[in-house]
Each structure stands twice: as structure tokens, then as C-alpha cells.
Image (spheres, helix red, strand yellow):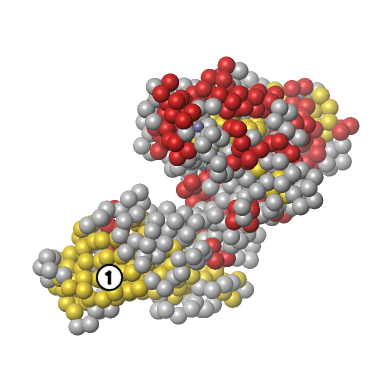
Amino acid sequence: MKTFVLLCSLLASTATIGQSRIHLIPQPVSVQEKQGSFTPGPKTSIRYDPAFREAALYLGEVLSIPVARILPGQTAGAQTILLSKQKSADSAAYILSIRPSLIKATASHPAGILYAVQSIAQLYLTSRDNQLPCAEITDKPRFGYRGLMLDVSRHFAPPEYVKKTIDLLSLYKMNRLHLHLTDGAGWRIQMDKYPKLTSKAAWRTHRNWKDWWKSDRSFSLENNPEAHGGYFTKAQARELVTYAARRGITIIPEIEMPGHSDEVLEAYPHLKCPNVTHKTGEFCIGNDSTFTFMQDVLTEIMEIFPSTYLHIGGDEAGKGNWKKCPKCQQRIRDQKLKDEDELQSYAIRRIEQFISSKGRKLLGWDEILEGGLAPGSTVMSWRGERGGIEAARMGHDVIMTPGSHCYFDHYQQDPATQPEAIGGYLPLQKVYSYEPIPAELEKEKQHHVLGAQANVWTEYIPTTEHLDYMIFPRIIALSETVWSDPSKKNWDDFLSRLYYHYRLLQKKNVNYCRPADKVDIKPAFDSTLLTATVQLNTEQYQPEIRYTLDGTNPVSSSTLYTGPFIINKTVQVRTAIFRNGKAVQKADTLLLDFHKALGKSVTYNRKWVSYPAQKERTLVNGYKGSLTYQDGQWQGFTSDLDVVIDLGKTEALRDVSCTFMQITGPGVYMPDFVEVFVSDDGKTFTSAGKALNDVPTDENRLRFKSFRVQPVNTSARYIHFYAKNHTGFLFADEIVVY
Ligand code: ACM
Ligand code: ZN
């Protein structure tokens, strides 16, 4: 939170919040606010260029202007909204001029005029008085691909909900809706050639994915009284395509292959590897019927969905069956493939040839890089940005959707306060902070990054109300990331505008996640580690934050936070947001440890694996980890944690501790135990104590535990810290020594 905002908040606590009347999200290229307003009313009419009829009718709906007053033409009377055509290099660009008696929107193309209209709609829906503030606005998007993926397989979302989502995406100038139509938990689109995909594979024995997953994962039959599920008929899907197009949104269908296809193989078991009798999600690549199936399905899909891109999944295919399957192995020999990675790549290339022969383009998750990327394919980078960077360097287009910033199935606030989610932690500010062009990507390759997309996987999202909750307001933060120039982005300013959009979301009956009353305490230790500058952040707009440094809970007379403050000794920072003189919830706390190991040298007997965090500095840099192991402060090990700290001189030791995290979904467990050994010469160590784990390994809620050893009458220069890995991942943030 920047100081100037807080000063304003003090001065303006009784005045109207915010001076500007313009609260557009995403932030346009330029906005000049003017005096006065345009007030839509009984005399207001819309005149449009014939190319812009659709947008004109939509604007009429938003402003309640009767169709009789929405006419083609360019003659403006009093109280006219004019939609005019004018050449522009960018079909999505628009200019919007709002004056007291005339609104003029110009663009070269229906896309641009729709964005102008959505800006008018936002101004209207976020205003207190249904007036449109006068302004001169020019605007165009930064990226051409601005997407949301909806997983309708794990839990089906009916067409009405998809339409509501389309309306909202359009309002925020997003332009792609990727529908994950098929997955192991259900097939969701009518296919004439393969009727069992919807008579069987679209219907489960359990409504809730989690219950079904824990059961024997059986399918039911359409019309069985106890069947749960659903699918889009072709007519419904076509209607969605048309509806979305009118809102400037292209629907991209995803048909998963060659993995994540359990439901297909339940309906058509002849497409499994012949030696596989158990349930499986992988097609047999050695069987030509697999390709017949895929081509038949994609042919029907292309008849429904006109999008250039067809998404074919490609992620997380288990390759074990293929290793043992005579047909797959025969295919490997016939095609002179090296291994099962190349077998997957063979399948994707074959599908890519088919898709491109029909004038379409293949889009797939980043696993399609493994074994060689098919020419002409576009990569969706989800396992971080590596796949995207690699593909862009090879000259392929990419869409960024890294789990770290774009997975809206992750928790958005403290998991203890939230409905169960799959794991992870992706608060609003982190979404907002996302920059789709990786810093390391060479300038001449950057144009391959077409944009970014949020993914909402629905394993733990059984209802559409819950979907709303996971999508909003995070998608609004992403909309600014993909539309606005980075120089226009500012978190505090975004929060001030978002404040007005909560009103809009209420009007639209969206069950959005309310801004958290949590205060994030962010220390920045300086390079000599002798001081830390502490900054307090929240999702609230202009909050009254008070804090203490003496371990007591803040009260209404505690120090008011007005900007970052500096500390130079171990303290417990306790802070809370106050409204009407009362703390709105339990205080947030962070212990800032100026402990004996801070900044000292650490030798790793075993290295971290894929979560280096701050490398050798991580465990002694003063920073505690937050709620997510992806925050760059949690170091991840798939082995035991086994390090030696050199304190530089012999010190008296009375307390050595380290916090670990458990979140069983992604396989993160507490250590079985921690043992601390000490030495004066760094060669001969003796045990100073052991701390055992008491967190059950089947506890699947996010848990933290500090393992503590308290040596008695002990002095030493070297500390050997050992934590026994239970299984999977071990995550540690800081070894604190006193
Ligand atoms: C994915 O999350 N498996 C693409
Ligand atoms: Zn096979």
C-alpha cells in the first residue's frame, strides 16, 4: 500500500471515496475526465453504422433504450449515442467521447466498437446515479488472446451459466472462452457417431466429483433416476457459439487426448491398449481405431465450433500402458520412434496434420513439447512458463497459463477461511501481478506470446455459485494484465476501481469472493540483514490498519499504519483492520526473527529439488513462508533436508527450530522427525535433540508445524540440521537459531 493512498484515506475518511468518477477495468490507454455527465433517459437514442448493429442493440439493453430508438444512421440529435466507423490499424481499438448531449464511439471493426460499448456499460453499472461521466478515452488491447478456461467435465455447467459467464467476460474485454469439454469424469458434448459418449460417459453415479473419485468411478446411464451429469446438445453448443460471438468471444473447444480420457474408454473399451483390463485414461496409440475416433470426433467438433484453434489436451498422459502394449510397441518400431514420449508426439503430430488439413490450428498443454512439438501447433504453458519459453524460442505461438498465477481452482484467501479447494494459493494481488512476457524471453521471440488465460478446474467446485466465487474477482485482475500496458498497472489504483465493480457484480448477481480482511505483513530485510522494512498489504480499499510490535493484540488506539516502517530487532508484528473502532477479525501476526543463523553460510548435503526458492540463502534469510509453497520462500526437497550451518563463531545455543508445511493434495508432508547435531570443528557432530511429528499424514487440510529442538548447556559453531522426508515433498522456510 503506497503511502500517499493512506494519507488520502485519513483525510478522506468521511468524504466520498475516490475523486474520479471513472473506474474502468481494464485500464484504458488514455482517459481524460471532463466536467459534466451524459444522462441516459427517455430521449436517448442510438445511431449506428450498419456494421455495428449488434453492439448497438446490446448497448440498448444495458441502458434500457427501446429498440425503436436504435436505428442505423449517423445523424446525431440531442442525447444521441453514435457508433461510427473509422479506419484503424487495430480492429480492437476504439475511441470514446462522452459529452453532456452526445456520446461518440468510433472503431474500425465490430470488435473495437463492442469494447467501446462495454466501457459505456461499465461506467453506467459502476456509477451511483446512472450517469455517464464526460470523458475522452482512447483504447486498445495489449494482447490478442485474453482467456478463461472452464472445466465442464468434472462438474457440468449448464448453458445458462456459460452465457452468464460470457456476458461477464465480455464486460471485462476478455475474448476467449476455452471449454474443457471432456475428461475422465465426464464427456459433455453430443457426438452423433459415438452416442455412448453422452448416453453413458456424461452420467456419473455421484454428483460430487470428490465422492465419485473416492468411489469406484463408475458411470451411469442417461435417464437413470440416480444419474448425475449432463452435456451440451449440438444445438445448445451452436447457440453458445453464436451468443459468445455476439459478445466478442470465441469459444475454443477442448477434446482431451491421448490421456484424461477414462470416460471415453469406459464407453468404448476397444480404444484401450488390449492388454489393459483395469480402468485407464489413455488411448492405445498402436490402434488405428483411436485415430478414426479422434478424427470423427474432431470432424463433428469443427462442424459446431468455428474457432481457428482446436484444443486437444495432451497433458498428463501416463505412459505405463504403452510400455507394455504390443500394439503401441509395434507402432514405436514401425515409426522408428525412440520411446513413449515420441509415441505421444507421433499421436499429436498425426492429429495436427488432420486439423491443419481442415484449415484449423492445434492448441495443446505444454506436454505436447515432449518427444518433439508438431509443426503449426500452439502451446498452452501451464507447468510454469518453461514450456512457453521453449516453444516461443522454437518459433511457436504460446498462451501463458502458469499454475502459479492463472489457476483459479487454487485458494484465493487463507485456506482456513475458504471452501475446500484443490490446493495452492493464488490471492487476487498475485493474479494482478502477473506479467505474461517472461523477462528471460528474447525480444524477437516475445511476439509469440499471444496472451494469457485463467483456468478453472472444477474437481472441488460442484456448483455454479462456487464457480462464480472462484472466478470473481480474480478474472477482473487478469483482464487488466492481458489488456493494459504494464505502465498503466498499479495495484492501489486497481483496488480503488475494483471497489466500484463489487457493486456491478452485485447487480449482476455474481457470487464473488469478498475482499479479505487479512493484512499481509511483508518484511524486506536489507542486504546486511541488520534491518527490515515492513510493509502491510490488504485487499481492502483504504483500510484503517493498526499494529503493535510488543506481542499484544492491536486496539483502536494502537499505531495507525501510514506507510512502511523499519525494525532492527526480533519483534512480533500484530496487525488488524479496524472499522468503526473495532478490529474486524483476529489479528494477523508475523514474527520477524533477527536470529543467530541469519545470513550465515549453509552447506547442503542434499540439494533442494524443483523449489530452490532463494537457493542457499532461503533457510537463513529471515523470511518466513506464506500460505503457498510457490512464494519463493519455501524450499522444496524430495529427499531429506540435510544441511550444515556455519555460525562463524562458537555461540551458546538454546533453541533451533524450523517450520514445515503439509498439504497432502500435491504430496507435501511433514517430516517424520527433525534431529539437530552440533559441532565445534565441523567434522565431529553430536546430537543436541530430536523433534517428532504429530501431524497425521492423512490430515489433508493445509497445516504448518514448527519442529523445535532445545539444546541444554550447549555451545557450538556448526549446526547440522536434518529432517527425515516422509514421502513426496518436504517444504521448509527458515531455520531459526537462538
Ligand atoms: C493441467 O492442468 N493438467 C493442464
Ligand atoms: Zn496400446
Residue in view at x 73 percent, y 49 percent: 228
Describe residue 591's horizontal placement relative to residue 506 as left or right.
left
- Helix, strand or loop at label 1? It is strand
Viewer-closest of 47 and 679: 679
Mark 1 residue's CB less than 8 Å from ligand 1: no
Residue 386 versus residue 713 in the image, above or below: above
Residue in view at x 31 percent, y 65 percent: 723
Q: Position of residue 387 (x, y in %)?
A: 42, 36
Viewer-closest of 585 and 222: 222
Residue 292 versus residue 63 in the image, above or below: above
Amino acid type for the residue under numbered disc 1: Glu
Quarter location, residue 48: top right
Residue in view at x 57 percent, y 51 percent: 409
According to the picture, the residue beneath numbered tag 1 turns out to be 675
Describe residue 70's horizontal placement relative to residue 486 as left or right.
right
Q: Position of residue 435 (x, y in %)?
A: 46, 42
Q: Farthest top residue? A: 357
